[in-house]
């Protein structure tokens, strides 16, 4: 690891994921020396960094957040000005099957980062990606703020809330400059395929170009406050530049159903989607050809699905003048284009 003193430096934990890769691109464009933390064997896929053309500009470091000494050693050596912590488990429904891994990765992993910062890099500024899942089923129908009650309804939400509480303790008790981004669902072309938005665009590209069987979804009526990952990530360095650390909601304040997202993406792929039947019998077809695009199976319904809620980014707007640029329709169109291009080029494993 080489430390370049004249540049501002940033360490991104979880650099191979959607947000990590986008932030790496952003920080490089801002002139930062960027260290990319990844966990070998688990999330060592670098396709996003390759697609963005930034892999060879990063210094990649294998850091397993479960190993306190590894985290400590990396942070001590690099002495980053900024640390962005995205590493951990992010698929909500897995957390019911692997609660221990969730808590270990998201809560204990974050604790190890906080301890390393407190002891060896007390001047570093830390951004921690928390989640809207900390709200769970709280205050139905209300627009959620940073002051809303936290009531997680799955182990993932618990792991993020515990980590967020630790961040707050280290900020208040030890003076660590640590910020939590309470991230509502955010997506874009670099989303992983297990999340519903990318599952939809990946499969629509397959159906458009190669045909085959319809995609199988879970609850099409489920709704989320979907924002643009690119919009959110671009504002993170601005949040860390603010001298008073705080927690910030990243949200659009608008709800969209899975069905609407499917319609927007299908239209962007050149289909004319029509929906038939209800519940488990719901289907989506292309009207002119009759091609079946999507159907529903109980297999993808969740034991407990977090109810729809929207967040207010008022604090973010007030503090850094945040304005999101992309609507859900823009996002669906961008994602659709990326997946059609990838399939045309034969890049199917991303
Ligand atoms: N994954 C998936 N697959 N979800 C489906 C499907 C399907 O086939 N069909 C319907 N859904 C519904 C889910 O039940 C859920 O209500 C919604 O689509 C979104 O699911 P995901 O895309 O898996 O995301 P999430 O909202 O559970 O979690 C994401 O957002 C959180 C922040 O709000 C993740 O990015 C989390 O890491 C993040 O914290």
Image: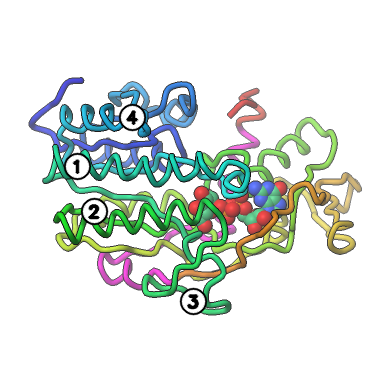
User: Which element carries disc 2, helix, strand or loop?
Assistant: strand
Residues in magenta? 312-341
334 lies above or below 71: below
Quadrant holding the C terminus: top right
Say few, some or many: other residues with alpha carbon within 10 Å of mark 4 (under 14 / 14 to 19 / 20 or more).
few
* Residue indicated by mark 4: 67
Q: Residue 1: percent from the left, percent from the top?
A: 20, 20
Q: Residue 148: percent from the left, percent from the top?
A: 42, 74
Is 98 positioned to the left or the right of 302 in the image? left
| Distance Cα–Cα, label 4 vs label 2 | 21 Å
User: Which element carries disc 3, helix, strand or loop?
Assistant: strand
- Residue drawn where x is 49% and y is 41% of the image: 89
Dot in front, 1 or 2: 1
- Residue drawn where x is 20% and y is 57% of the image: 171
| Distance Cα–Cα, label 1 vs label 2 | 10 Å
Quarter occupied by residue 76: top left
Q: Residue 144: percent from the left, percent from the top?
A: 46, 73
* Residue indicated by mark 3: 143
Of 155 and 139, the residue lying toward us: 155
| CB atoms of marks 3 and 4 within 8 Å | no
């Amino acid at each position: 690891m080489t430390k370049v003193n004249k540049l501002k430096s940033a360490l991104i934990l979880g650099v191979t994921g959607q947000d990590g890769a986008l932030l790496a691109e952003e920080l490089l464009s801002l002139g930062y020396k960027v260290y990319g933390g990844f966990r070998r064997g688990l999330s060592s896929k670098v396709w996003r960094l390759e697609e963005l053309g930034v892999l060879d500009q990063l210094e990649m470091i294998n850091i397993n957040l479960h190993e306190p000494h590894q985290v400590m050693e990396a942070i001590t050596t690099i002495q980053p000005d900024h640390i962005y912590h995205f590493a951990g488990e992010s698929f909500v429904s897995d957390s019911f099957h692997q609660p221990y891994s969730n808590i270990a990765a998201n809560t204990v992993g974050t604790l190890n980062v906080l301890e390393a910062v407190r002891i060896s890099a007390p001047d570093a500024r830390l951004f921690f990606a928390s989640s809207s899942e900390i709200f769970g089923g709280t205050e139905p129908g209300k627009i959620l703020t940073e002051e809303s009650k936290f009531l997680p309804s799955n182990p993932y939400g618990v792991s993020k809330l515990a980590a967020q509480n630790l961040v707050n303790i280290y900020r208040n008790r030890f003076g660590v400059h640590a910020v939590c981004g309470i991230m509502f669902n955010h997506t874009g072309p670099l989303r992983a395929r297990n999340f519903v938005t990318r599952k939809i665009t990946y499969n629509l590209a397959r159906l458009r170009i190669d045909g085959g069987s319809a995609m199988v979804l879970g609850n099409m009526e489920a709704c989320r406050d979907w924002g643009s990952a690119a919009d959110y990530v671009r504002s993170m360095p601005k949040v860390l530049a603010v001298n008073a650390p705080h927690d910030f909601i990243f949200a659009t304040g608008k709800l969209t159903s899975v069905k609407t997202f499917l319609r927007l993406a299908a239209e962007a792929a050149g289909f004319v989607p029509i929906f038939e039947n209800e519940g488990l019998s719901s289907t989506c077809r292309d009207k002119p050809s009759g091609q079946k695009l999507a159907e529903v199976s109980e297999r993808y319904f969740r034991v407990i699905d977090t109810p729809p809620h929207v967040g207010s980014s008022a604090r973010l707007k007030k503090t850094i003048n945040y304005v999101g640029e992309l609507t859900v329709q823009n996002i669906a169109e961008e994602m659709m284009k990326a997946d059609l291009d990838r399939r045309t080029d034969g890049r199917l494993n991303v």
